[in-house]
Amino acid sequence: MPKRIEVKSFDSEGNEKLVYVVSPSPAVTREAQMEYNRAFKDAIKSGALLKQKLQSVMEEQGVWDEKKQERYDTILASTMEKEAQLQTGGIKLSEAKKIALEMRELRIEFRELIAERNSMDSNTAEGQADNARFSYLGYACLVDEEGNRVFSNFDHYQQSESEPFVIQAARELAQVLYGLDADYENNLTENRFLQEYDFVDEELRWIDKEGRYTDIDGRLIDEDGRYIDEEGNYVDREGRPMSEDGDYGVDFKPFLDDEGKPIIKEKAEETKEEEEEAEEKAEEAETEVSEEPKKTTRGRPRKKPATKAKKTAVAE
């Protein structure tokens, strides 16, 4: 392992993070093993299964049965046979391409079976203990520019394991500790064959003889995976023209009446009708308001002020 591996990533708030992954020292390895032992003991106390009993439990619950095991073994054997064919050569290139595609499909199914078979592994006592040990190694081997640990304690690290930069650092550490190949997909026999004979590019995307992106059946696509024609215009899977928004109205033609004449829908007429409807509604609203009964004032009527003549009479 290099002295340290640089990891450039982000935290959950989008801030840039620069951290480093270093090789675990003997002391750190011993501490990680202590975490394993502690987690294993706690798992046993809580009733977790041991791996050796897991197979029978999975069979009892129908998670894994003889039929799935047979398919698992068949895929392994078939993949090895096809791998030998590609490595040996001596067959038509078109046939070799077909074999490579079959291998891709087999590997997808194989991964699904493995995921199903291992779905309960992390729940075993050993699985929980393995996770605890790796988490501790992730905490102890993650340092900053000065070589100090990024997290002040193990609990703080465990609370932050979902942070993007922590996930990236853990991935780098796993590749070193467990011998994982970062270029695993590119190094598969079928993918090396497809790259060597220019069926796919370095990113394993399908291309034609001119290096343009295509789907698996040779239809042209752009960088975003949308179908296009030779001129770069958007089309659907069958080659029908489409707009950038995915509509089929690019070359729209008017509908025909029963006599075969085009039906022209004037937008001006539609607008005029809408305006007339709006005016009618406004007039109806005004009529309703004018027909509402006037509010009457409740309470005693006001006294009329005395006239000037009356006031003079009273004074006399």
Image (cartoon, grey):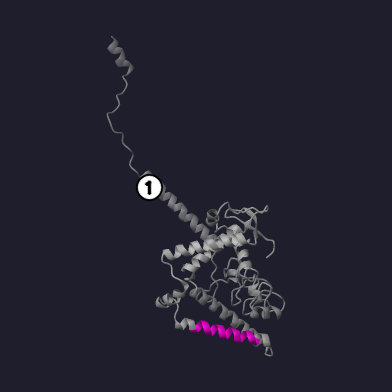
Q: How far from the left and from the top, in percent, is residue 223?
A: 65, 69
Residue 238 falls in which quadrant of the image? bottom right
Q: Residue at x 63, y 64 (%)?
A: 172
**Viewer-nearest residue: 240 or 145:** 145
Residue 253 at x, y = what percent?
A: 58, 72
Classify residue 316 as left or right of residue 220.
Answer: left
> What's the amino acid at mark 1?
Glu
Q: Residue at (37%, 47%) from the top-left corner?
A: 288
Asked if one can make out residue 97 in the rendered structure from this viewpoint, the answer is: yes
Q: Which residues are magenta?
A: 70-85
- Front position in the image: 185 or 201: 185
The residue under the point 56% across, 85% down is 77
Residue furthest to the top: 316
Residue 60: % across, % down: 40, 77
Q: Main secondary structure of the magenta part?
A: helix
Q: Residue at 65%, 84% (x, y): give it.
A: 97
Q: Quadrant of residue 173?
A: bottom right
**Residue 30 lies within the magenta run:** no
Residue 76 drawn in magenta: yes
Asked which secondary structure carries label 1, the reply is helix
Q: Is residue 265 left or right of residue 295?
A: right
Residue 204 higher or lower than 31, as above or below = below
- Looking at the rendering, in which quadrant would you find the N terminus? bottom right
Side of 78 relative to 309 (left or right)? right
Q: Quadrant of the C terminus?
A: top left
Q: Which residue is mark 1?
A: 288
118 or 253: nearer the viewer? 118
List x then y, in percent, for residue 294: 33, 39
Work out whether residue 122 can be spotted: no
Residue 214 vertical placement versus 78 (above, below): above
